[in-house]
Amino acid sequence: MRAGQDLNLHNADDHICYLGYNPTLDGLRGIAILLVLFHHLWPWEWSTSLTTIITRISHISWIGVDLFFVLSGFLITGILLDARHRKHYFRNFIVRRALRILPLYYLFLLICFLIIPYIFNDMDLKETSLDQVGQNVFWYVFYASNYIWMLNEPVFVDLVGIDEFRLAVKSPEFLGLTWSLAVEEQFYLVWPFVVFVFWKKLPGSIIGIILCIILLRLFLVSTIENWADATYMASICRADSLMIGAGLAVYARSTAFRPEIWDRFAFTGLWLCLPAVIIFQLVFPGRQTPFFSVLGYSLIALGFAGLLASVLRNQQSLLKVIIQASFFRWFGKYSYGIYLYHMIVWFLMQKLINAELAADGSPIHGEIFNPIGGSMLIDAPVRMLLTVFLTVAMAWLSYHCYERHFLKLKRLF
């Protein structure tokens, strides 16, 4: 069932808020995954007078994850609202989500914990100490990796007594990216119950939840040592992005829906909130400022919700035409696989063709330094494009040879 499949669309002055399946949403997913790829794969240390601006922009393109959150909140809430009176409400939703998410996720974990360590042993590259990370496989298997930061947070270690579970080493990046998947999976488990029980009071509930999350982030910033990780990765701190997307879905289905209010929100989010956050991040890069950790994530979500609201209008604006381009929609279709695979490909490339330098100019992976083409000016873009190509190929094969067989089972639910 697609979101909004059997909705009553709201008409007012011939303006229609389209709630059904929309190819534009695939385009937005494509933009989100391309932002994430740009953030992870553009070499931060590689900067010339021609690339300084690009490098600076790559520092803030992590916001692609927040676009995913807003889209998930909007789409999942729409599905739940449309199905709330149907038989097997909980079973159908949980099983359909599981068929979409779990097969690829656990294949990814199998690669990370079994196949990659074997390759490392074969290459005699053990400095990553994946065997030690494997001792904490529980956090990844049960979608709790976004709370691993607590294992090294003094306040929680003393309060709960979890010192014996502390990670011996930091998780490699290709495992670290699972934090956002954990946030969404926890949302999928809790939100259906909230929608089913409180669907008549969702607007007020969503506003209250968002305000509580902002206050919680303020409390954490002023209380714990590791507040930057906590406010960025903990589900209870990042649910505001999901809630803002959910609020958009609720209002789109409300009898109080007014096109002019929708358009004002779209303009405010897209042309005020989003540019303000981007400018702030360009001036004060990173997520380590208290002000940004308290309010920044909510402003990003409002900005992307404004973008979503704008492209959902039934009008052929230039922005909508661009987002609907087949290039973005293609990346959106395979975005889940691309997200999971890209850091594995990048990590292995760094191991096999070592050209990554530390801030002091020394090679990060041993003494071998072998940039592609013999020059970092050639290596950086070639390595990035090669990684994208291999990642996309893996995601395409994974979808058509593996994931698709599970997705066919969704029709039974």
Image: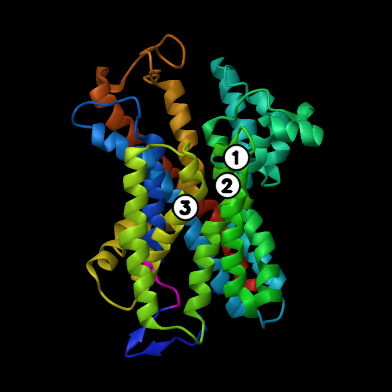
Q: Locate residue 184, reporting x and y percent.
A: 59, 55
The prevailing secondary structure element of the residues shown in magenta is loop
Picture quadrant of residue 349: top left
Q: Residues within 10 Å of mark 1 (few under 14, many from 20)?
A: few
Q: Locate residue 408, reporting x and y percent.
A: 58, 65
Residue drawn at 31 percent across, 19 percent down: 371
Picture quadrant of residue 82: bottom right
Residue drawn at 43 percent across, 9 percent down: 367
- Report the disc number at residue 66: 3
**Depth check, front residue: 409 or 317:** 317
Specify which label sits upstream in the sequence, 3 or 2.
Answer: 3
Q: Secondary structure at mark 3?
A: helix
Q: Residue furthest front?
A: 222
Q: Which residue is mark 1?
A: 222
Q: For marks 3 and 1, give the one nearer the viewer.
A: 1
**Is 89 placed left or right of 330 in the picture?**
right
Q: Amino acid at mark 1?
A: Ser
Which residues are drawn in magenta? 19-24
Question: Is 102 situated above or below 55?
Answer: below
> Which quarter of the rendered picture does the N terminus lie within?
bottom right
**Depth check, front residue: 169 or 297:** 297
Q: Amino acid at mark 2?
A: Leu
Q: Is residue 150 visible?
A: yes
Q: Locate residue 266, reporting x and y percent.
A: 36, 69
Q: Amino acid at mark 3?
A: Asp
Q: Residues within 10 Å of mark 3 (few under 14, many from 20)?
A: many
Q: Secondary structure at mark 2?
A: helix
Question: Is 334 situated above or below 9?
Answer: above
Membership of 22 in magenta stretch: yes
Q: Which residue is mark 2?
A: 218
Q: Residues within 10 Å of mark 2 (few under 14, many from 20)?
A: some
